[in-house]
Image (cartoon, rainbow, N blue to C red):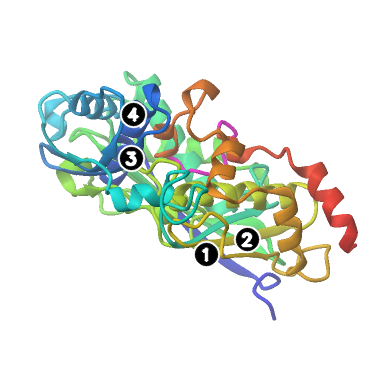
């Protein structure tokens, strides 16, 4: 029996903006935003490391923008909430080490229009990228990951907006949601796990009450029942956290960033990379394509894969898998539909999603670096504005 029709439990996790790896992602993307502010053509590949009392910023950056790297990093950390010395990692007092140089000219000529072997802008690297969508939630995201995100995001909002009442909360936290599926649809939450950093004097019962309140707020009532099992700070204590408790690195939470383990992943991280890097931009485009296919009713769920060679504009391959939920009899026919509706060259992706000018369109790359790159309407790859074109192109195959 196909897994899509089998009864099973699937689990996904999320981590908060205060998790050490996510601190790094946000610093790297804050630097990207700062570079793009005055130079939309900036080339950025920024990697960050954090540990006790230290931030290390490294990578290859070519930009005309005048950026104070240290100031950008400290501001990002302060906004997360690491702004007191007693937390063990403080934006105002930690050391910041800068190790940045310009982009390799060998890479640059492959991704700059009119340079290299090809006249058109090529992909910034080789590799394969995936996008996914499913109609099991309003966001067209898998239920376990979207609700895991919502739990830690709401806990962070409470920590900041009601800091007097919930003064025991600190920035680092993780969530995990297990959901039972029947015939391919989520039917009930089985287990919720939350580990949240806290002060020494916290009463665990206060955290338990808060987490249960948040879970019932962000997860639809039809998925919740009295049998949900909660594991809240299951070790009993989580005082030492953030970069003081665990070294953080940019790009270590790629499954948290995407679909929570549902579908496939090409392996490339997103944060700290400008839009010429197809690891990021093509993954965003694949989500855009998959989401529009599902939103148009062509399938209940869809995964899209593309592959590129460095310096080459056109994708080497396009593959779509609807898990036998599509209304077209052969998923291979979706490739022709995708090619007709979407421009998958790097320059076409950048233009379609306007990836060089996030601030002008009301979003930032730093916002992507916590609580998932997908499933939030603020980002252009979440638009469902290709429904009519997809339906028109699909008529030839129905």
Q: Position of residue 67 (x, y in %)?
A: 25, 24
User: Do residues under tags 3 and 4 come within 8 Å of each other at their CB atoms?
Assistant: yes
Q: Of residues 233 and 179, which is closer to you in this image?
A: 179
Please determine whether, in this image, residue 376 is positioned above or below residue 245.
above
Residue 267's x, y, as percent?
41, 61
| Residue 264 badge | 1
Cα distance in 3D space between marks 2 and 4: 32 Å
Q: Residues within 10 Å of mark 1 (few under 14, many from 20)?
A: some
Residue 44 location, quadrant: top left
Prevailing secondary structure of the magenta residues: loop
Q: On the image, numbered disc 3 is attached to which residue?
A: 44
Name the residue rendered at 73%, 52% in the picture. 293
**Circle 2: is it few (<14), some (14-19), or many (20+) Cα within 10 Å?**
many
Callout 2–callout 1 Cβ contact below 8 Å: yes
Residue located beneath label 2 in the image = 303
Q: Residue at x 20, y 33 (%)?
A: 201
Q: Going from the N terminus, do you reach mark 2 or mark 1 first?
A: 1
Residue neighbourhood size for the residue with mark 4, other residues' Cα within 10 Å, grouped as few (<14), some (14–19), many (≥20):
many
Callout 3 secondary element: strand
Identify the residue shown where x is 19% and y is 41%: 101
Element class at badge 1: loop
């Amino acid at each position: 029996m196909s897994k899509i029709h089998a009864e099973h439990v699937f689990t996904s996790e999320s981590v908060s903006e205060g998790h050490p790896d996510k601190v790094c992602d946000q610093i790297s993307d804050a630097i990207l935003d700062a570079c793009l502010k005055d130079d939309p053509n900036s080339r950025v590949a920024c990697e960050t490391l954090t540990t006790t009392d230290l931030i290390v910023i490294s990578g290859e950056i070519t930009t005309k923008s005048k950026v104070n790297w240290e100031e950008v990093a400290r501001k990002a950390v302060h906004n997360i909430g690491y702004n007191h010395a007693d937390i063990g990692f403080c934006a105002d007092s930690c050391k910041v080490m800068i190790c940045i140089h310009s982009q390799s000219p060998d890479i640059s000529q492959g991704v700059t229009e009119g340079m290299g072997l090809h006249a058109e802008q090529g992909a910034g690297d080789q590799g394969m990228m995936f996008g996914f969508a499913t109609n099991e939630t309003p966001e067209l995201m898998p239920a376990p990951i979207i609700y895991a995100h919502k739990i830690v995001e709401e806990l962070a909002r409470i920590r900041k907006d009601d800091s007097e009442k919930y003064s025991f909360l600190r920035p680092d936290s993780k969530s995990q949601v297990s959901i039972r599926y029947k015939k391919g649809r989520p039917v009930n939450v089985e287990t919720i796990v939350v580990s949240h950093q806290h002060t020494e004097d916290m009463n665990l019962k206060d955290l338990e009450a808060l987490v249960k309140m948040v879970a019932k707020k962000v997860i639809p009532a039809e998925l919740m029942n009295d049998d949900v099992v909660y594991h809240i700070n299951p070790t009993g204590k989580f005082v030492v956290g953030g970069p003081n408790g665990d070294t953080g690195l940019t790009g270590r939470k790629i499954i948290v960033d995407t679909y929570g383990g549902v579908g496939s992943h090409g392996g490339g991280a997103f944060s700290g990379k400008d839009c010429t890097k197809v690891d990021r931009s093509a993954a965003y485009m694949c989500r855009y394509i998959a989401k529009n296919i599902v939103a148009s009713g062509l399938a209940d769920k869809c995964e899209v894969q593309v592959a590129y060679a460095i310096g080459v504009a056109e994708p080497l391959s396009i593959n779509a898998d609807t898990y036998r939920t599509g209304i077209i009899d052969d998923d291979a026919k979706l490739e022709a539909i995708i090619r007709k509706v979407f421009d998958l060259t790097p320059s076409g992706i950048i233009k379609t999603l306007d990836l060089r000018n996030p601030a002008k369109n009301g979003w930032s790359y730093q916002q992507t670096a916590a609580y998932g790159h997908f499933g939030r309407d603020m980002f252009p790859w979440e638009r469902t504005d290709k429904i009519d074109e997809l339906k028109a192109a699909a008529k030839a195959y129905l």
